[in-house]
Image (cartoon, rainbow, N blue to C red):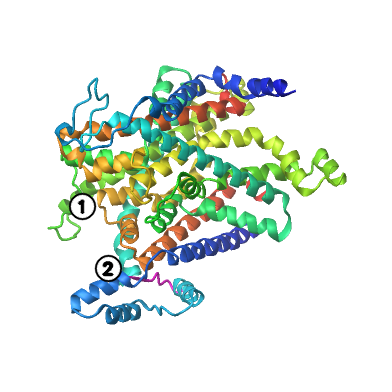
């Protein structure tokens, strides 16, 4: 229990440092955060820039003469209340954007992570047990080559080959623009169809990583004394392979599964931007492009919170699996 | 004395790398690209003048990789760009190793509140998802023209933390050993203890880490250039890829397919070389992975 509380306090400190760092960084970005909003107000209402800037500042709750530290204080207190800020580009609260975007992101990354984990575990332990044979060479060789392709390059390739050239997947969006979201079968099928591109672009690099990690763990465990001992006891190879080797090799990976889902929240940025898939990463990329400071800090805080929560879960899971961790 | 040191270096580091198949192939690939970056630009001239009559030429003897949207030879650009790709990667990895070692050694050696604080900072950089953070930094510097060292530093900020954590753990186990105690008793000074006594033990560690992070360094820097967020060398492969896909729309015209293809091919080959070398080195220096091969 003391371990849990210790880690929790520690991670909250880390979270605070990380979010503060990003707040300062983003507020150091060149330009007035309200400028973009002011331009659109000036155009919409046909008024002078100066006046529009004033309105924009009021709308976003920014006083340009206010020192950074006061703005920071309000940012943190808002976060504590669960208010992630105001987006000047979309002219709505960041919470609203998160509510709209997060389900898509979670849908894609959880499915992609789950599938790639299961396939990776299987391929990795299979390769390790066939060590040195041509099967192992092919599996780990292909996994290494996939790792050499930067994820955004892979995403671009998938988009252009399957969406532009072959036209088997759509070019963007989470569902067809002319359809109303509903729980009908045809709508669900469309949603899956639209998620295929980002899903494969996310799953393939991960699958390669899980495969190589599992292969490494399995090979290491196969050298352990207790495996030799089990063999000496005359246990069946299949029992040793599944109960002794596979499970033990998989345990540390299960802990990193949580972390990996957390990181995917952030790592998904490019994939979603490339596929125009309306998740968190897409809005994050947009926020950078249009210099929407409020949206940027809000989404980044969300991502960091996600990663920290995932890290915490992973640490707890790891401590449950391996009691030695607590002793450290 | 110097000769002996050199032969030690050869037996400790070079020979095991040649005897391992993966690291040998990886080294050959990387050596090829290093040669391309060092002497390539001297042999292959670069002519960036547009020549619209020759746009999107297929690969031929005259243009081994064909020509781009502006009729410029792609092979020439790849060769000249390799210089900034490689130097950026090497600098970024080097900076990451330096920062990681210094912070890690300090964290391992310092006790009390200073150590705790350093620990928290290391964790912050471990926890923050690198790519989004890198994007923000890049956006801040998007309008400034940066040189190699500056871009490398921006990339290195997101690479050093894992090494710092490993080094700190190593230092913690080492610092109570006799020879460190001896140095302390002899009043050798903190700097001597940290960077002579302890760092010596860490060299193989740091060496492995330098190579393993080459991959991320390449990926990050190419990603930055690809997104066009940092102004840089127009022949950098990331910038070339950006031109190919977004400016020239090469994939939308069947004629231009070879343009992004050759850029991607070189990127993947280079990173693959780095991965092979890293895997080989890990097998060499971490005998547990070698098993019964």
Q: Residues within 10 Å of mark 1 (few under 14, many from 20)?
A: some
Q: Residue at x 59, y 56 (%)?
A: B121
Quadrant of the rendered structure where residue A41 is? bottom left
User: Mark 2 — residue?
Assistant: A90
Query: Which disc is residue A325 wearing?
Result: none
Asked whether, in this view, residue A200 is left or right of residue B270, the answer is left
On whether disc 1 and disc 2 are found on a single subunit, the reply is yes
Instruction: Give the secondary structure at mark 1.
Output: helix
A84 within the magenta span: yes
Q: Residue at x 31, y 30 (%)?
A: B76
User: Mark 1 — residue?
Assistant: A188
Which numbered disc, 1 or 2, marks the residue closer to the eye? 2
The N terminus of chain A lies in quadrant: bottom right
Quadrant of the rendered structure where residue B226 is? top left
Look at the picture and state if A47 lies above or below B209. below
| Residue B81 position within the rendered picture, expressed as x and y whole percent measured from the top left | 37, 35
Determine the main secondary structure of the stretch shown in magenta: loop
Q: Return the residue nearer the eye: B2 or A153.
A: B2
Q: Residue at x 43, y 52 (%)?
A: B134
Q: Which residues are magenta?
A: A81-87
| Residue A92 position within the rendered picture, expressed as x and y whole percent measured from the top left | 29, 72
Is residue B99 at all visible to an observer of this figure? yes
Asked whether, in this view, residue B32 is left or right of residue A291, the answer is right
């Amino acid at each position: 229990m003391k371990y849990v509380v210790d880690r929790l306090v520690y991670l909250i400190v880390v979270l605070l440092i990380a979010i503060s760092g990003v707040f300062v960084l983003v507020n150091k970005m060149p330009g007035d955060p309200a400028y973009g909003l002011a331009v659109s107000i000036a155009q919409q209402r046909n008024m002078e820039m100066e006046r529009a800037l004033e309105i924009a500042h009021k709308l976003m709750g920014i006083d340009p003469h206010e020192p950074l530290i006061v703005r920071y204080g309000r940012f943190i207190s808002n976060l504590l209340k669960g208010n992630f800020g105001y987006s000047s580009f979309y002219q709505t609260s960041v919470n609203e954007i998160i509510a709209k975007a997060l389900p898509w992101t979670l849908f894609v990354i959880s499915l992609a992570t789950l599938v790639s984990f299961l396939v990776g575990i299987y391929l990795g332990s299979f390769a390790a047990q066939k060590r040195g044979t041509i099967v192992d060479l092919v599996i780990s060789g292909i996994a290494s080559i996939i790792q050499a392709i930067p994820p955004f390059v892979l995403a671009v390739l998938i988009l252009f080959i399957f969406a532009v050239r072959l036209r088997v997947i759509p070019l963007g969006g989470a569902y067809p623009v002319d359809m109303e979201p509903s729980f009908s079968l045809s709508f669900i099928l469309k949603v899956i169809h639209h998620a295929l591109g980002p899903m494969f672009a996310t799953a393939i690099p991960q699958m390669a990583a899980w495969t190589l990690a599992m292969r490494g763990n399995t090979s290491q465990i196969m050298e352990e004394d207790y495996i030799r001992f089990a063999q000496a006891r005359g246990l069946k190879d299949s029992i040793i392979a599944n109960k002794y080797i596979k499970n033990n090799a998989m345990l540390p990976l299960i802990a990193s599964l949580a972390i990996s889902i957390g990181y995917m929240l952030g790592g998904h940025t490019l994939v979603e931007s490339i596929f125009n898939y309306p998740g968190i990463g897409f809005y994050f990329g947009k926020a950078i492009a249009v210099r929407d400071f409020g949206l940027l800090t809000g989404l980044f805080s969300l991502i960091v919170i996600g990663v920290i929560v995932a890290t915490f879960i992973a640490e707890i899971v790891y401590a449950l699996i391996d009691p030695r961790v607590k002793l450290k | 004395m110097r000769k002996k040191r050199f032969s030690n270096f050869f037996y400790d580091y070079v020979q095991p790398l040649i005897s391992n198949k993966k690291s040998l192939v990886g080294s050959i690939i990387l050596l090829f690209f290093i040669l391309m970056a060092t002497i390539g630009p001297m042999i292959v001239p670069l002519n960036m003048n547009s020549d619209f009559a020759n746009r999107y030429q297929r690969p031929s003897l005259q243009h081994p990789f064909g020509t781009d949207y502006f009729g410029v030879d792609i092979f020439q650009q790849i060769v000249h760009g390799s210089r900034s790709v490689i130097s950026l990667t090497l600098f970024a990895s080097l900076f990451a190793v330096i920062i990681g070692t210094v912070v890690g050694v300090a964290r391992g050696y310092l006790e009390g509140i200073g150590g705790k604080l350093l620990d928290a900072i290391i964790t912050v950089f471990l926890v923050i998802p690198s790519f989004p953070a890198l994007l923000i930094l890049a956006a801040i510097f998007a309008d400034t023209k940066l040189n190699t060292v500056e871009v490398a530093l921006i990339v290195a900020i997101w690479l050093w933390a894992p090494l710092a954590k490993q080094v700190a753990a190593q230092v913690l186990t080492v610092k109570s050993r006799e020879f460190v105690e001896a140095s302390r008793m002899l009043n050798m000074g903190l700097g001597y203890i940290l960077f002579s006594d302890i760092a010596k033990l860490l060299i193989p560690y740091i060496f492995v880490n330098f190579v393993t992070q080459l991959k991320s360094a390449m990926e990050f820097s190419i990603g930055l250039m690809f997104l066009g967020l940092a102004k840089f060398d127009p022949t950098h492969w990331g910038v070339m890829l950006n031109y190919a896909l977004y400016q020239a729309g090469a994939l939308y015209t069947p004629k231009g397919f070879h343009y992004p293809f050759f850029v991607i091919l070189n990127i993947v080959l280079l990173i693959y070389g780095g991965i092979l070398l890293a895997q080989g080195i890990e097998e060499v220096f971490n005998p547990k992975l070698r098993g019964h091969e």
